[in-house]
Image (spheres, helix red, strand yellow):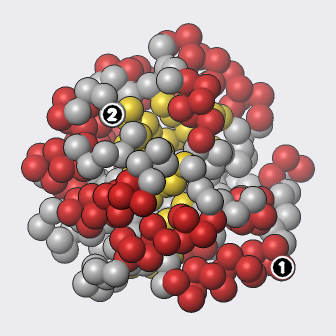
Amino acid sequence: MPNIMKFKPEWLRKKITPSINQELELMFRDTRVNTICQEAMCPNISECFSKKQATFLILGTICTRACSFCAVDKGKAMTPDVNEPNNIAQTVKHLGLRHVVLTSPTRDDLNDGGAEHFCKNVHAIKRMDDSIVVELLIPDMKENKEALRQVAMSGAEIIGHNLETVPRLYHIRSGADYARSLRVLHLLRSFNPTVVVKSGIMLGLGESDEEIKSLMQDLINVDCRLLSIGQYLAPSKSHEAVVEYVHPVRFEHLREAGMEMGFSYIKSSPYTRSSYMAQEYLREGV
């Protein structure tokens, strides 16, 4: 579907202030820590960095898949950094974070999809301070059951895996499968019933409310009770085109519909992203 949206509406004119970001950017460079905030060109970066909050990107900055909506670089990934868990833990301590979100690019080149490395990062943080809440946002790991079991038992309190969009639009997710992603969420809960599972989707790609509500029901059916809903913004002209800039009223309508269906907490707004204000989900919804 062609991009018919030439100008952003007033509710999407958030300013990014590079000067606010410099202190944390320098620290992350010195500690050899990556963030999805920088790699995915998140529009909330200045807001979060000003509060000394960030979502860490482990397992490198190169993704082995080529989704057409994502700003993360694609190509041949590097060997995981054995020092990364300690670097992440020390950065968490320096920032004074009480809720830490870790994510990664998809690593289809690794037999376990990166599961062991996720676990090492969780363990490093928990060894430092077990009271810190750790949230993981993982790729599908090719539905490797042993890998997913390891992640589920890692000690992380929340584990997310994003559906991103409705089944009809899954051509934008190279190498992904809607049903498989649902099974991943189900397996995480099956392996560890105490873990809270979370997912996230984007609006603005041409999906209908009926399709979104059907997706929500699919998530309820696999016992996923936390959901983020945000506006898709194309990182460049070469990425998937924006079909619609969705009005905030529709975001609220979908949030209310989802809560009525049984979700514990939904954050739904144009600038919502998977880990944006992540601490709210446990405080408000669980």
Residue 177, how many percent across, how many down? 27, 47
Residue 47, how many percent across, how many down? 77, 59
Q: Residue at x 56, y 33 (%)?
A: 281
In which image quadrant can residue 50 be found?
Answer: bottom right
In which image quadrant can residue 196 be found?
Answer: top left
Q: Nearer the viewer, mark 1 or mark 2?
A: 2
Residue 33, how many percent across, how many down? 49, 78
Q: Residue at x 26, y 49 (%)?
A: 154
Q: Secondary structure at mark 2?
A: loop
Q: Left or right of 248: which side holds 267?
A: left
Query: Looking at the picture, which amino acid does disc 1 mark?
Result: Ser
Instruction: In the rendered structure, find residue 69 and report the number of the disc placed on it.
Output: none
Q: Which residue is tagged 2?
A: 195
Q: Residue at x 49, y 72 (%)?
A: 90
Q: Is residue 270 above or below residue 68?
A: above
Q: Is residue 35 above or below residue 193?
A: below
Q: Which residue is tagged 1?
A: 19
Q: Residue at x 23, y 33 (%)?
A: 192
Can you see residue 263?
A: yes
Residue found at the very far bottom of the displayed protein: 30
Q: Is residue 21 above or below residue 133?
A: below
Measure the C-alpha gap from mark 1 to mark 2. 38 Å
Query: Looking at the picture, which amino acid does disc 2 mark?
Result: Val
Can you see residue 2?
A: no
Q: Secondary structure at mark 1?
A: helix
